[in-house]
Amino acid sequence: MKFNVAVISGDGIGPEIVSEAKKVLDKIGSKFGHEFTYTEVLMGGVSIDAHGVPLTDEALETARKSDAVLLGAVGGRVGVDSWYKLPPNLRPEAGLLAIRKGLGLFANLRPAYLYDELKDACPLKESIAEAGFDMMVVRELTGGLYFGERKTEEIDGVMTAVDTLTYNEEEIRRIAIKAFDIARKRGSKVTSVDKANVLDSSRLWQKVVNEVASGYEDVTLEHMLVDNCAMQLVKNPAQFDVILTENMFGDILSDEASMITGSIGMLPSASLAAGKFGLYEPSHGAAPDIAGQNIANPLATILSAAMMLRYSFDLDKEADAVEEAVRCVLKDGIRTVDIMSEGMTQVSCTGMGDAICERL
Ligand code: IPM
Ligand code: MG
């Protein structure tokens, strides 16, 4: 089969890690008889440099016309890179928000998994790490505080800022359905996270999630307050299968979930629209401090490409092969510097891409 992938290399280590993911896709292509073509799209700082905005309409259109989008990372150093002298709506990260909204990517899937081989990197107590964990944070991505009305103005001589948190039942229903569908293919449990003891939007969230749950008798649902969830993630992460939550809570909890894996360089993510279209990117950022040194860990981007094979192209066998190759590489003791430990073999970013390809 033929697939047209829009590639957003972006800033910092973006170009390095994306090129390893493309290498892996091409290997999959030759092994399984598929053809991947790539269309470069500018977003983030590189787009600001070229066009003065973090995402042009043309770039968004090119992405929209593709079969899926592979993204490296965008952004730079606040206070160092000139991009951050621009107003907030013209900074690199604004490109990310614009593409999420513009492509209708409402469902953000962020797996957090503790690899056996990397248990030592887990910052939690040994007894907790021993139990392991394997969860999927399903974060609503195009609503809530991120996209509500905002303004800053002086009222009676006092500077006042307002951000609005809005959700309608349709936005909640479609993300809840995604979470339940995903839970069905995993551990059949959904933990829906909200702040229903304070927020109206959370009370509507609970009501709609309960309605959706009634169509999924085989999936267990529990509701958890967000502050409690933050505690439970470090106390007993093994209890979670799918965490379903709104945009802002998901931003925070997904960082916490990734931190406890001890290896943020390993975590992929998918942002899905209705249907098969999606954008795939590592959970980590652009890491400008190590850019251009060929030492970044490309595994999160490679695993994001695997998610693309699975969710956008329905190529489960191919996705399994990539994920298995990652496990093999870890078993064989091959490590980039961020996950290096005694007795292992350290490789570069390109060395890691090659090691994956050799095992495919
Ligand atoms: C993320 C990031 C973004 C977000 C930022 C860069 C706008 O933190 O993808 O989690 O808050 O969504
Ligand atoms: Mg975040």
Image (cartoon, grey):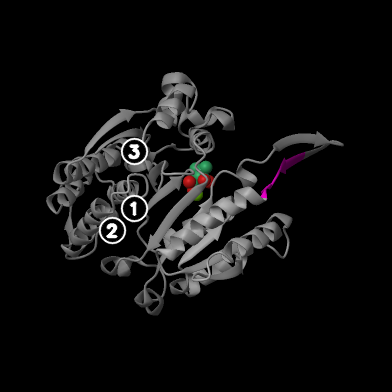
Q: Which residue is mark 1?
A: 265
What residue is at 47 percent from the left and 59 percent from the top? 181
Q: CA distance from mark 3 to mark 1?
A: 12 Å
Q: Quadrant of the N terminus?
A: top left
> Given contact means CB atoms under 8 Å apart, are the residues at marks 1 and 2 in contact?
yes
Q: Which mark is residue 339?
A: 2
Q: Residue furthest bottom?
A: 127
Determine whether the residue tagged by mark 1 lies in a helix, strand or loop.
helix
Check the image and report above or below for 172 versus 122: above
Can I make out residue 221 in this image? yes
On screen, residue 264 versus residue 273, left or right, reads left
Q: Looking at the picture, how far across and down is residue 158, in whole percent?
A: 81, 39
> Does residue 112 sit above or below 188 in this rendering?
above
Q: Amino acid at mark 1?
A: Gly
Query: Is 164 contained in the magenta span?
Result: yes
Q: Secondary structure at mark 3?
A: helix
Q: Residues within 10 Å of mark 1 (few under 14, many from 20)?
A: many
Q: Earlier in the sequence, mark 1 or mark 2?
A: 1
Q: Residue furthest top?
A: 51
Q: Which residues are magenta?
A: 160-168
* Residue at disc 2, CB closer than 8 Å to ligand 2: no
| Image position, residue 100 (x, y; %) | 50, 39
Work out how far the residue at label 1 is from the one at label 2, CA to CA, in angstroms: 8 Å
Specify few, some or many for label 3: CA neighbours under 10 Å numbering under 14, 14-19, or 20 or more: many
